[in-house]
Image (cartoon, rainbow, N blue to C red):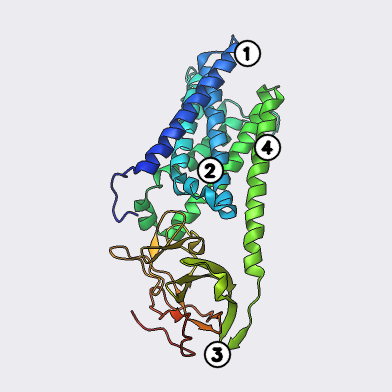
Amino acid sequence: MSVQYGAISWNGQKKVYDLTLVCLLGLYLAVFVGVGAWRNPSATAETLLIRALGTAAFLLLNVVLCIGPLARLDRRFLPLLYNRRHLGVTTFLLGLAHGCFALFQFHALGNANPLVSLFISNPRYGTVADFPFQALGFFALIILFLMAATSHDFWLRNLSAPVWKRLHMLVYVAYALLVAHVTLGALQSETNPLLATVLILGVAAVLSLHLAAAFREKRVDLATHHAVDEGFVEVCKVDRIAEKCATIVSLSGERVAIFRYEGKVSAISNVCQHQNGPLGEGRIIDGCVTCPWHGYQYQPESGAAPPPFKEKVPTFRVKVVEGCVFVDPRPNPPGTRVEPARIDSPPAEGREAQPR
């Protein structure tokens, strides 16, 4: 969590994460270049590096896109999600190295500027088999650069969460451009079916995991709850909620995280103000709801982040009657304190939100 632009501190987990990533990438590049030189002795070192860096970047982007839905389907993948931005920046650096080597080898020795040559050397934009696929990779790299350059929380704060989120959702545009880049490039130069197989498996994995996560979330949104008392709706039995954890329900089109802790129940919006992380999939740590994605925290009674942080989420009135949890689906303004409902002694009906 950052309140100003500054150097990022690497904790023990991040150091292990990054060291593992660097070692795996180094091993991949070495094996790729070695096997490539053995199978094709006439290939130049530049050609082998271009292919090694390009395939590494594309495979890593597939991993990046799979981490999100995997974390929604299985909490054991959350440590990968916590450091996903490291993977994203690494993907850009690999793509940049791939692009620089390719630009030098194919466009730097002519009379035109290499970047100009990239777009004019092959004018067959109206074909499929001979389409100038390198331009697609260039535009994908621009998107990856924008995402890497704005990955620090300083940009999230200054661009605002909605703008930052829309910018980083362009990763799917970059992915589509790279799929087309690889596909069209393979049509022009590759005869080995291995590349096509890896491409198909990667796209299938990304699509299937996103669909599986979407269907799971859809079940939450489709569950119906009917008002039973002064606008309150019954959402679940209190025993269904594990201690210091939450259950997530959809009320009036908004997802609500209902937390149970220390004999009390509170409800806040499920959407973290950092990157729209699912607060209800986190737990209460040191008295605060802690987002499972990047550790942003909110007080369950008020939906406000502890000082000096200023993020706030909406709160909801809650009561517990005969072991059942009832929630008023009308959200209070972000940061509004609401007295928690006591599990052992039902609170008075219609308790109003109190100002903080």
Q: Which amino acid does label 1 sit on?
A: Arg
Residue at left offset 50%, top offset 20%: 30
Q: What residue type is labelled 4?
A: Leu
User: Which numbered disc, 4 or 3, marks the residue closer to the eye?
Assistant: 3
Q: How far apart are marks 4 and 3 (CA)?
A: 53 Å
Q: How far apart are marks 1 and 2 (CA)?
A: 30 Å
Is residue 251 among the parts visible in the rendering?
Answer: yes
The x and y percentages for residue 282 are: 48, 60
Q: Around disc 3, counting alpha carbons within 10 Å, would you say few (fewer than 14), some (14 to 19), or many (20 or more)?
A: few
Q: Is residue 325 shown left or right of residue 93?
A: right
Residue 64 tag number: 2
Q: Is residue 174 shown left or right of residue 222?
A: left
Q: Which mark sits nearer the N-terminus, 3 or 2? A: 2
Q: Is residue 11 shown left or right of residue 182?
A: left
Q: Name the residue under label 1.
A: 39
Q: Quadrant of the C terminus?
A: bottom left
User: Which numbered disc, 3 or 2, marks the residue closer to the eye?
Assistant: 3
Q: Is residue 19 shown left or right of residue 106?
A: left
Q: Which mark sits nearer the N-terminus, 3 or 1? A: 1
Is residue 131 among the parts visible in the rendering?
Answer: no
Residue 201 tag number: 4
Residue at left offset 36%, top offset 63%: 286
Q: Which amino acid does label 3 sit on?
A: Glu
Q: Mark 3 points at which residue?
A: 230
Q: Which amino acid does label 2 sit on?
A: Val
